[in-house]
Image: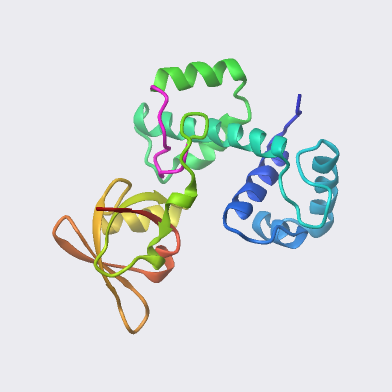
Amino acid sequence: MTNLNPQKEDYLITIFKLMGEGEKVTNKSISTHLNLAPPSVTEMLKKLKKEGLVTDDKENQLTEEGIKVTKKLLSKHRLWEYFLENELGFSWKDIHPIASDLQSVTNDELLEKLNAYLGYPDYCPHGSIIFINNEETPDDFIKMSEAKTGKAYIIRRIRDDHDLLSYCENMEIGIGDKIKFLAYDKFDNTAIIIENDKEKRISPKACKDIYLKEID
């Protein structure tokens, strides 16, 4: 049985997300994302490789077991986010750090009971997949920065970042909203969309972290 602690969890989740974004997972990229000194990263990767969670080579990929463990970990986190917003009324901007604390103390029995209580939801409030309930993959989505003129989309995921979520609230866009993509502004690539019969202009910075799924 894998013995995880919050620090190991941070590493596994970081590697998983870097892999999903198609980035090269180097010691340096992990160090940058976690804001940790390179020697600390090297030491922790040695432990994760010894435990069979990370491949033993320069490209730090999760092993099959590492992916399984991380998907379960992310499912715990996202179920708690769902609970905090839908059951306790927390804002979607504020739930990430609380869920991070709760994921670390959630054993299998609590996970099963929480999941059943919530009705086995497919997504967290930010639109991220709850893997133990949903087989969909992020490959089904595109970034708003890659949207095509004239196409209709549904907003499926927004990266879990407090400032970005606040921005989306101010722009009155959220998960499940249907939009029509009109164009990119020629000056700075601002996305021009129609949502609820209103034209909206979405910052290029935000577009990189808002994910869409094309609809007919």
Q: Please tell me which residue lies in front, 206 or 58.
A: 58
Is residue 123 rendered magenta in the image?
yes
- Relative to residue 134, is residue 60 drawn left or right? right
> Closer to the camera, 197 or 20?
20
**Residue at the (72%, 40%) spot, across then down:** 8
Q: How many marks?
A: 0
Which residue appears farthest toward the left when viewing the image?
A: 197
Residue 1 position, x and y percent, is 76, 24
Determine whether 10 is above or below 4 in the image: below
User: Where residue 3 sits in the image (x, y, percent)?
Assistant: 76, 28
Farthest residue toward the bottom? Answer: 187
Pick the residue in front: 110 or 155. Answer: 155
Q: Which residue appears at 68% of the width and 37% of the height?
A: 6
Q: Residue at x 39, y 40 (%)?
A: 125
* Left or right: residue 103 compared with residue 8: left
Whether residue 8 appears in magenta in the rendering, the answer is no
Q: How is the image coloured?
A: rainbow
Give the magenta range.
119-129
Q: Is residue 196 left or right of residue 74?
A: left
Asked where in the image residue 163 lies, by quadrant, the reply is bottom left
Among the 4 quarters of the image, the one containing residue 196 = bottom left
Q: Position of residue 12 (x, y in %)?
A: 68, 43
Above/below status of 86 relative to 67: above
Task: Give the image location of residue 198, x and y in percent.
Answer: 16, 62
SS assignment for the magenta stretch, majority: loop
Horizontal relation, residue 204 to residue 28: left or right? left
